[in-house]
Image (cartoon, helix red, strand yellow):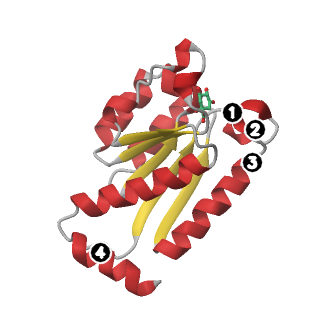
Amino acid sequence: MHPRLKILVIHGPNLNLLGLREPEVYGSVTQDAIDQTLQRIADEENLQLKILQSNSEGDLVDAIQAARGRFDGILINPAAYTHTSIALRDAVGAVGLPVVEVHLSNIYKREEFRHHSYIAPVAVGQVSGFGAYSYVLGLYGLVQEIDRTASCVTTSQAKRRKKK
Ligand code: DQA
């Protein structure tokens, strides 16, 4: 039984610059605003969130590794490392937790080098192209996946709903 799911939210490189960075691609939303939205949903859904951002590939690998046994799932925007990092992919593959990959922009509508994700084959699924709402869809998808795979699915869902 898991009365309160623990979710690790990871923002990859340059996402700390959201709001300033290429607004024609990423919109004017800031990382802070995304985090506040996710926290509001977490409060409603009885989830515990830890949110981190790093520009460093090694720090992201360390955070994913450290999530084993401490979190029930990971929501990640790997940003540019999506397209380059076998290390991040191996960490996701090794951690043994459900991972959902999100992107603000539709990576398949952009430059060809963004069409390939090293993370997608080891993720539960990917949400791409809905702006900040990609994170919201990704969070709900991740929670649904955790509930679906948990042996105590009915109990955990019922418990969270009761607490709302
Ligand atoms: C991104 C897409 C990536 O290609 C890019 O490198 C990013 C942001 C997105 O959220 O749309 O930094 O992950």
Q: Nearer the viewer, mark 1 or mark 3?
A: 3
Q: Which residue is mark 3?
A: 30
In this view, the mark in front (4 or 1):
4
Residue that protrudes farthest toward the top in the picture:
112
Number of the label disc, if any, that sits on residue 64: none
Under circle 1, the secondary element is: loop
Mark 1 belongs to which amino acid?
Answer: Asn
Whole-angstrom CA distance, mark 2 to mark 1, is: 5 Å
Residue at the far bottom: name it: 162
Q: Quadrant of ligand 1?
A: top right
Element assignment for label 3? loop
- Mark 4: few, some, or many residues within 10 Å (few <14, many ≥20)? some
Please name the residue that numbered disc 2 is placed on: 17
> Marks 1 and 3, how far apart in space?
11 Å
Q: Position of residue 30 (x, y in %)?
A: 75, 48
Instruction: Where is residue 108? Give x, y as percent.
Output: 52, 24
Q: Nearer the viewer, mark 3 or mark 2?
A: 3
Of the image marks 2 and 4, the number of the one nearer the N terminus: 2
Distance (Cα) linking label 2 and label 4: 37 Å
Contact check, label 2 and label 1, Cβ < 8 Å: yes
**Mark 1 vs ligand 1: CB below 8 Å:** yes
| Residue at 32 percent of width and 34 percent of height | 122
Outermost residue on the front side: it is 109
Question: What label sits on residue 156 in the rendered view?
Answer: 4
Query: Label 4 sits on what residue type?
Result: Ser
First reached walking from the N terminus: tag 4 or tag 3:
3
